[in-house]
Amino acid sequence: MNLIVSAIGQGFLWGLLGLGLFLSFRIMNTTDMTVEGTFPLGAAVSVSLIVQGTNPFLATLAAFVAGALAGLVTALLITKGKIPSLLAGILTMTGIYSIDLMVMGKSNVSLLGKKTIYSLAFLQKLPQYFDSVVAGTILIVLVTCDLIWFLSTDFGQAFIATGDNPQMAKSQGISPQQMTVAGLMISNGLVGLCGAVVAQCNGYADVNMGMGTIVIALASIIISEVVFRNLGLASRLFAVSLGSIIYRLLLLAVLQVGLSSNNLNLISSLVLSACMMLPQVEEKLRLKQTFMKGFKHD
């Protein structure tokens, strides 16, 4: 039971990562590899500040700002430097690795004995692992509601329109470059926030903890789209977090079978591949059934 509760809690926390990538990947139609660097950057900034005595909530907010600045760098490389989004993200991600080392002073920093956002009195009174579930639920609800509000504003609608059709948006007086900057800043800000809350939950930050994060984020998005179909935008945002939880439970189920945790990245890739191929398989089966019915009718 504890393992299931822990998986659900981790699913909520990592759901912030899925929401961040959803903005860039689904709404903006941009391939942004920056997230693999932004995640450990958020962790490094928050943990380093907490170790130095900063209030954990301020440290977590600083992680969001740090992630947003990383997104700004990628956006400027795309809009001003005219570098393809994939390459721009890789360049930023590579540079962030050195920044993480400068921020932490070493490859990993522990939070042993330090107060975090999970040190609140009411969270400490909860049963084991329930603190991450409650904290994750609060964070997901707050962030998702804020995103729904943002996307319902005139600026948010312009943001969505730019992702749907940049040329049409430009003809309506919308600046695609401005939308790209805003979108990548918000997206990577959320990823940095995710890195902060996950690092505080785990009790440490490590420069290599961003490896494979884009696969985890994509899995949350794709699983939510496969399991929960025909949803509006607001419902879709909440579904991303549920997709993150399902993904964590799938990993737990696989590990319970007896596979080594060293194979997590391979398992993640296989799960994501299967989810992405499922709609095509269903379509082929549907066409086959239609053909067979037509053949029998004849």
Image: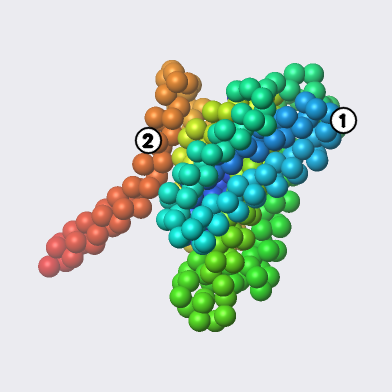
> On the picture, is 287 further left or further right than 227?
left
Q: Quadrant of the N terminus?
A: top right
> On the picture, is 118 further left or further right than 9?
right
Residue found at the very far front of the displayed protein: 81
Where is residue 298? Give x, y as percent. Answer: 12, 67
Label 2 element class: helix
Q: Can you identify the residue that label 2 sits on?
A: 270
Q: Which amino acid, by three-letter code, is at mark 2? A: Leu
What's the image's color scheme?
A: rainbow
Residue 228 is at least partly visible in this image: no
Q: Which amino acid, by three-letter code, is at mark 1? A: Ala
Mark carried by residue 121: 1
Where is residue 12? Give x, y as percent. Answer: 64, 40
Q: Residue at x 24, y 59 (%)?
A: 287
> On the picture, is 64 further left or further right than 86?
right
Label count reads 2
Q: Identify which residue, 207 or 146, lies in the foreground.
A: 207
Residue 152 vs 14, above or below: the answer is: below
Residue 33 vs 156, above or below: the answer is: above
Q: Residue at x 60, y 53 (%)?
A: 72
Label 1 element class: helix
Where is residue 117? Give x, y as percent. Answer: 78, 34
Where is residue 153? Give x, y as percent. Answer: 68, 70
Residue 264 is at least partly visible in this image: yes
Q: Residue at x 44, y 56 (%)?
A: 83
